[in-house]
Amino acid sequence: MSKLTVDLQDAYQQPGIPEPAHLESWANLAWQGDESSEVTIRIVGEQESQALNLEYRGKDKPTNVLSFPFEAPAGITIPLAGDLIICAPVVEKEAREQHKELMAHWAHMVVHGMLHLQGYDHVIDEDAEVMEALEVQLLGQLGFGNPYEAEELEKDS
């Protein structure tokens, strides 16, 4: 069985951040690889998230999660999945606005980011359906509900 090592960097030390053991278990569950690997999860504030989002995505605002898959130079094989940057204030704000339990939303952000590191995407509808179905399945295994239900209800009304 493959194992994922999680390197946690907490650059935003406020209440409400999940315990490291939770972040590690969520990331491990979402790791679909056959080989062991390593991921860095960095918890940041709005300023760092906004700077990275602007630099790498051209969007001048903080965002919930950024995924940076590791791209090894030719001939180098290092078992690194990449980095997740999670903005704690944005996750907290979204959970509040979307009426979601905070820990469920944190779990969703970790699972969502981990899937991005493994090549899953949601730009094209068909890809989004595959990614979202896997997210719902994994979050269900953790005891959390479908994070997209509230969005579906809003679309239907």
Image (spheres, grey):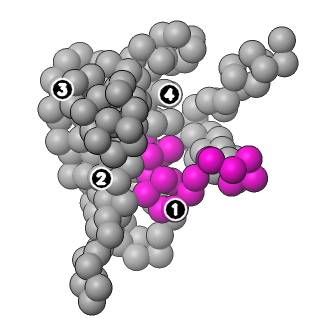
Judge left or right: residue 13 versus residue 46: left
Judge left or right: residue 140 versus residue 153: left
Judge left or right: residue 113 versus residue 140: left
Name the chief secondary structure element in magenta: helix
Q: Residue under circle 3? A: 12
Q: Determine the CA span between mark 2 and mark 4.
A: 21 Å
Q: Where does the N terminus fall, quadrant-wise? A: bottom left
Residue 117 inside the magenta-drawn segment? yes
**What type is the residue that disc 1 sits on?**
Gly
Mark 4 or 1, nearer chain start:
4
Looking at the image, which residue is at 24% across and 33% down?
Answer: 51
Nearest the viewer among 149 and 121 is 121
Q: Residue under circle 2? A: 83
Nearest the viewer among 105 and 44 is 44
Nearest the viewer among 6 and 86 is 86
Q: Determine the CA span between mark 4 and mark 3.
A: 19 Å
Mark 4 or 3, nearer chain start:
3
Q: Residues within 10 Å of mark 4 (few under 14, many from 20)?
A: some
Tell me where the magenta segment starts and ends, as one range: 110-127
Looking at the image, which residue is at 39% across and 42% down?
Answer: 57
Q: Residue under circle 4? A: 104
Q: SS at mark 2?
A: strand
For residue 1, say whether it is visible: no
| Labelled pair 4, 1 in contact (Cβ < 8 Å) | no
Q: Residues within 10 Å of mark 1 (few under 14, many from 20)?
A: few
Q: Determine the CA span between mark 4 and mark 1.
A: 23 Å
Q: Residue furthest front?
A: 58
**What type is the residue that disc 4 sits on?**
Ala
Q: How many marks?
A: 4
